[in-house]
Image (tube, helix red, strand yellow):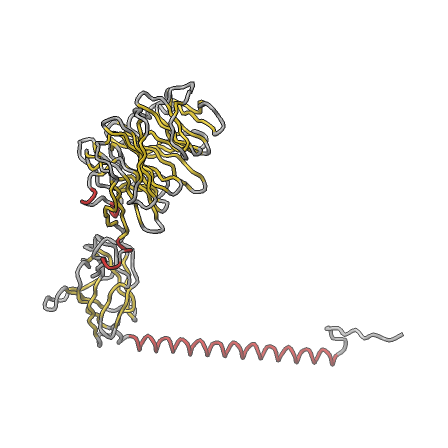
Amino acid sequence: MRKIKIFSIFAHNKNDRSNINLIGMSLKKIIYLLIICTSILNVSCGDDEKKDLLLNQDDPRVRSVVFMNISSPQFVINDTEALIYNYDSLTYGIDLSKVKVYFYGYTSSPTFYYRYDAVSAWMPFKNGSAIDISKPFYLFSTSEDGTQTKTYLFEARVHKYDVNAFTWKKIGDINLTSPVVSQKSIVYNNQYQWFCRTSAGENYQFVSTKENDWTMKKLDKKKYQWETLALFSDTLWIQDEEGVIYTSPTTKLNFKQRSLSVKVDRLLFELDNKLWAIADNKLYTLYKDSTDFCVKNELPSDFSVENITTFTANSGFTQLGYIYATQKDKGTIWTLDYSGNLLQLVSSGTTIPYLTNPMVYIYDKTLGIVGGKLKDGTYSSECYASYDSGKTWGIDWHKKLNSDIEGINNAGVFAYSSLGELVIVGGNIKEEPSPAVWKGVLNKLIADELNYK
């Protein structure tokens, strides 16, 4: 049998122990040497840093600029031409009268002064001070040791025009000369469809795929209230002045009366594959394969159906129904979920005013309400927007209606955020019907019309 030697790390005799002691002493010496080298390196690096600081003490240059109370852009600091300016222009209309500015140099405590012209006395500047940067000014920088100076011209560049606003242009007319008393616009099957009833009692459908080339179809003479028109399961639903319901296939218009067990006060919209309606102060739903409405929920006691505008929009991973309604002297927003819960999001007395026939749209996940007639009889040009699914609203002054379409109301607004466009079909200009098509294009997409400071 072969003998196998097993080596142990433990010393078995005196000589072995001596060897281990020698190894231990060598390791200690190596550790001591490493500690000494590290200390020398640290001292050397520290001396280099001190030398760098001493070298930088005579450097008056500006290294960076930061705004604190407004969004801070990226700045270009051109030491050759002694210019400081922002790389991207700031938003048109921004208030720059009191901006908190911080200038940072290459030393820990440079000294700054400023003035707005070449002859005025220099004024001391303290970082974080709120100053007027709406006009260019000179910035005088002194190095930390006081031996060197540099003067810059500082300019906060601002868009000369509102690049996030829309430029509106009439792109087509709908050939109808009779006064319109009821109307609604929809988009279906990639076609714009405008329905209307004239003062002579005639009903029309106008269809277009190019926004400026319309074909007309004359319908029967019932007193349809086109504002109640709802699209559900490839079928058009409409009420007349008496509340009677009529339906027609979308492929071939032929409205026929629909027999129902309840008298509907107002058709709403399709939501969760059901048609929703209001009747007898209750919410009703109708399924695609059903022949009649069934009651869903009671309406809140403070909800009024007298002056409403309806639409649906995505909220996260689900879809909600929205109703703009009026209460006393103000407007409010209600949201409806799949279970029939009607919740008031904006209560009376908040941002949105009392409006008749406002226009609604969804643009890049933003809900918008624009135009309409105010309670005092004037017409609103403001746009009210919500970025959180209708919970809070504010004025979006970028989309305020300009003088070309001031007073427009009761029209269909169709948004194409990927193209930067809004299209308005039909509606009224103040009290006068406007059978026309308007297109709004974002200014930033109209390159030849942009001017910057």
* Residue 221 coordinates in the image, percent (x, y): 30, 25
Is residue 386 in view? Answer: no
* Residue 79 coordinates in the image, percent (x, y): 25, 73
Relative to 425, residue 59 above or below? below
* Residue 318 coordinates in the image, percent (x, y): 45, 39
Is residue 92 in view? Answer: yes
In front of the other: 164 or 250: 250
Could you tell me which quadrant the N terminus lies in? bottom right
In front of the other: 428 or 207: 207
Q: Quadrant of residue 251?
A: top left
In front of the other: 393 or 435: 435
Q: Quadrant of residue 100?
A: bottom left
Q: Quadrant of residue 294?
A: top left
Relative to 240, residue 56 above or below? below
Relative to 430, residue 140 above or below? below
* Horizontal relation, residue 240 to residue 27: left or right: left
* Horizontal relation, residue 255 to residue 57: left or right: right
Residue at the spot 61% in from the left edge and 77% down from the top edge:
27
Residue at the spot 43% in from the left edge and 18% down from the top edge:
261
* Residue 356 coordinates in the image, percent (x, y): 25, 32
Residue at the spot 49% in from the left edge and 28% down from the top edge:
289
Residue found at the far top of this picture: 261
